[in-house]
Amino acid sequence: MTMIAPQDEPASGNTKVTRRDWIGLALQTLISDGVASVRVLPLGQKLGVSRSSFYWYFESRQDLLDQLLAHWRDTNTRAIVERAQRPAESIIMGVMNVFECWADERLFDPRLDFAIREWARRSDDVRRAIDLADNDRLGAIRDMYRRHGYGEEDAFIRARVLYYMQIGYYVLDLKEPVEARVSHLAAYLRSFTGQEPSDADVAHFVRFIAAR
């Protein structure tokens, strides 16, 4: 699937909605009500337009669903992979780069990730997309550890612990304030790296949180 950038201009003769509007509402519906509710007629009614507007932008409902998957891949998965691949002076800084995804939902939307995983229960194709995404995310985090001198197995297991812990955190829907998690940042970093973070390391991430 190839993500086509949403058009900012409305369809010819239609001053109400754009492709971005259709995709935005479809994403909201997927998150709130599940993939079964992502249907052309109800979406059009909410947008106040006819089906012809939809078919100006999309070939079919499946085309729209493909674009939702592509959006998820190009946001949630790309954010983790990109941050794991960033140059970092230490593994502690590398892990904090990945932590940015957990701290800023503009980078990684956990509700969207959960909605895609729910969708995968009903679709083998989406299940395969989930498996590929998880492998890409884990592989990028594993390679981050390897670049900082960890052995193959140690890097693999540490990547799993870091990634699966966070996904489990979302699945359990824990309601822990950001401030509470940040208060344990040094302990998390020790756990994920086996190294002692400095006060400057902790302060660096606190500044990131404050600037969101």
Image (cartoon, grey):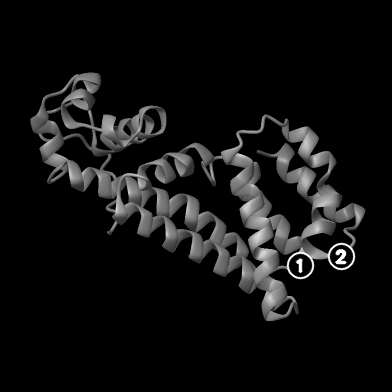
CB within 8 Å, label 2 to label 1: yes
Horizontal side of residue 140 vs 66, given as left or right: right
Q: Residues within 10 Å of mark 1 (few under 14, many from 20)?
A: many
Horizontal side of residue 178 vs 127, given as left or right: right
Q: Position of residue 59 (x, y in %)?
A: 12, 46
Q: Residue at x 64, y 48 (%)?
A: 166
Instruction: Name the N-terminal-most of marks 2 and 1.
Output: 1
Residue 197 lies in what quarter of the image? bottom right
Q: Residue at x 62, y 54 (%)?
A: 164
Horizontal side of residue 1 vs 60, given as left or right: right
Residue denoted by label 1? 91
Q: Is residue 25 above or below residue 189?
A: above
Q: Residue at x 75, y 61 (%)?
A: 93
Which amino acid, by three-letter code, is at mark 1? Answer: Ile
Horizontal side of residue 28 vs 161, given as left or right: left
Any mark on residue 195, and which? Answer: 2
Q: Position of residue 204 (x, y in %)?
A: 80, 51
Q: Position of residue 51 (x, y in %)?
A: 10, 29
Q: Residue at x 66, y 33 (%)?
A: 174
Which amino acid, by three-letter code, is at mark 2? Answer: Gln
Kind of element beneath mark 2: loop
Kind of element beneath mark 1: helix
Closer to us: 121 or 40: 121
Residue 169 lies in what quarter of the image? top right
* Residue 104 in view (yes/no): no
3D distance between C-alphas at marks 2 and 1: 9 Å
* Residue 177 in view (yes/no): yes
